[in-house]
Amino acid sequence: MTERAGADSLLLRAALASYAAGVTLVMIGDGRDDIGTTVSAFCPLSMDPPLVMVALIADSYPAEVLGRPDGPAGFAITLLAAPQRVLAGRFAAAGRPGARLLLDDVPRLRGGHSGALIPAGGLAALDCATANLIPAGDHVMVIGHVLDVPYAAESADPLIRFRGRYPPLSQ
Ligand SMILES: Cc1cc2nc3c(=O)[nH]c(=O)nc-3n(C[C@H](O)[C@H](O)[C@H](O)COP(=O)(O)O)c2cc1C
């Protein structure tokens, strides 16, 4: 058990890191460029209508782009499979280049509604319209209306983040 030592925020970080979460990529095509970021704060919200949520760091570039009044209509979410760990690293790196370059060696498609890049080989992909942005502390909750499911794999292991690592699934 983690001792209650140091700042409360350290304890909170340790507590939250013990929540095992799937890892996704959130992709946005803003007309000029493609941007993307690694996101574990993903949550299915509703089936009717079909809504999902991702939480983005409020002052991150993806959040800024989605919040523009004349911003892109939507975004795509790819639920990553275990072999795509390298993509999670690429799309979390500081100062990373655009998504086109980062997916240069990866088979990919585009969301029919969002126009965003979607790497093939994930567990599933969701093409979303931006339904709502809700500020929440240092993050913004982005609600997506799922307009299409470009693919859903029948079997694949998920990429999981747990305590700052990507542990293999033991079966
Ligand atoms: C496993 C993992 C999960 C992450 N989850 C989120 C998340 O849920 N929301 C978020 O905004 N950033 C998340 N990040 C951080 C972003 O991918 C990215 O590193 C951060 O936004 C900094 O990007 P910037 O250089 O564009 O500012 C995560 C990173 C990793 C490695």
Image (cartoon, grey):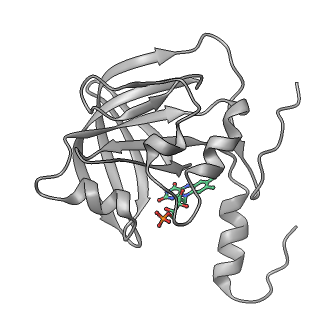
Horizontal placement of 119 versus 13: left or right?
A: left
Residue found farthest to the left: 70
x 62%, y 46%: residue: 88
Q: At which x and y percent is residue 66?
A: 26, 53
Horizontal placement of 165 versus 47: left or right?
A: right
x 72%, y 32%: residue: 82
Query: Is 33 or 25 nearer to us in this picture?
Result: 33
Please tell me whether residue 169 is drawn above or below residue 89 in the rendered image. Answer: above
Query: Is 91 or 31 nearer to us in this picture?
Result: 31
Residue found farthest to the top: 154
x 11%, y 57%: residue: 69
x 43%, y 36%: residue: 77
Q: Quadrant of the C terminus?
A: top right
Q: At which x and y percent is residue 138?
A: 41, 72
Query: Is 156 or 90 nearer to us in this picture?
Result: 90
Instruction: Answer with the quarter of the image where residue 58 lies.
Output: bottom left
Instruction: Answer with the quarter of the image where residue 94 lies.
Output: bottom right
